[in-house]
Image (cartoon, rainbow, N blue to C red):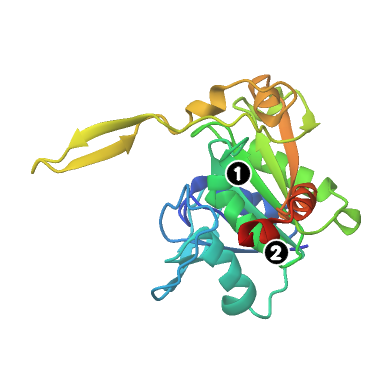
Amino acid sequence: MRILISNDDGIYSSNLHLLYASLRRAGHDVRAVAPAEQHSGAGCCLTVHGPILTNRVSIPHASGGPFEGIAVSGTPADCVILALRGIMPEFRPELVISGINFGPNAGQDVFFSGTVGAAIQAAMYGLPTMAVSHCAHSGITMAHADLAVRLAEAMDWANLPLHRVYNLNLPDCPAEEIRGLKVCRHSTDWACLDSYERRFSPRGREYYWMIDPFQHFQLEDEGTDKSWLHKGWATLSPLNIDLNDEDTAKKLNENKLWEAALS
């Protein structure tokens, strides 16, 4: 398959290199376009008020083997759009994989994640797409990357709905200890991200620092991605990027809002 990969941790991420190497070993035609720097939490942000610079990167001794890709000065979303519409017009990917992310993208993470944000751009173009994350911030091995690749290969992309992000999370354990795969919904147990510490610069200027950005992942929400991940299962959550709420729109129309506002 022709596969485009990207991420939000940056072009020098060892997780990206392992995914690239695993896909190449499996015989796929892989191209990597990723941010030049760390962009975790970027969501679907785009660069609209400045230039986007690109640079070819070659790392002979990357994790898993030689790595080649294109570094982009913009966001993860920029990377995918540029790859599809600017940098490589001759390369038409059959699949887009974003990741492998350091840390989970479960529950409300999907709204902030640059990994998911990159995948959303591909889904908007009607391409099969996966976002892949590992629940730890270290310890990923080639076995984890191989598992993600085999799951991607097992997906019946020709018969699955498009305009979806298939969000895969791997639990924090060795690949051989993962209990299996749960296809489930993502958690909607919304937690407030309120752990900010008030600090002062050496010159006395006030600023705030998020001290535990992953606290919400620890919350239990039975039957959802978070809960299964805590129990050692991999999770796959199909995310529909169509945000329309037709039932609520119908109720609003029944309320005759325009007439009420003018009365």
Examine the rendered structure and indicate whether residue 188 appears above or below residue 35. Answer: above
Q: Is residue 82 left or right of residue 200?
A: right
Is residue 29 shown to the viewer in this render? no
Residue 110, labelled with which disc? 1
Q: Residue 77: name its quadrant.
A: bottom right
**Extreme left residue here?**
203
Say which quadrant the N terminus sits in.
bottom right
Name which of mark 1 and mark 2 comes first in the sequence. 1
Indicate the secondary structure of the residue bearing disc 2. helix
Cα–Cα span, label 1 and label 2: 16 Å
19 lies above or below 3: above
**Contact (CB < 8 A) between labels 1 and 2?**
no
Q: Residue at x 49, y 33 (%)?
A: 138
How packed mark 1 is, by other alpha carbons closer than 10 Å (few <14, some 14-19, many 20 or more), is many
Q: Which residue is mark 2?
A: 124
Q: Position of residue 254 (x, y in %)?
A: 79, 52
Residue 186 location, x and y as percent? 69, 35
What's the amino acid at mark 2? Met
Looking at the image, residue 6 sits to the left or right of residue 224; the answer is: left
How far across and how far down the image is residue 26, in percent?
74, 53
Question: What secondary structure is found at the residue carrying circle 1?
Answer: helix
Residue 157, placed above or below residue 215:
below
Residue at image coords 62%, 29%? 189
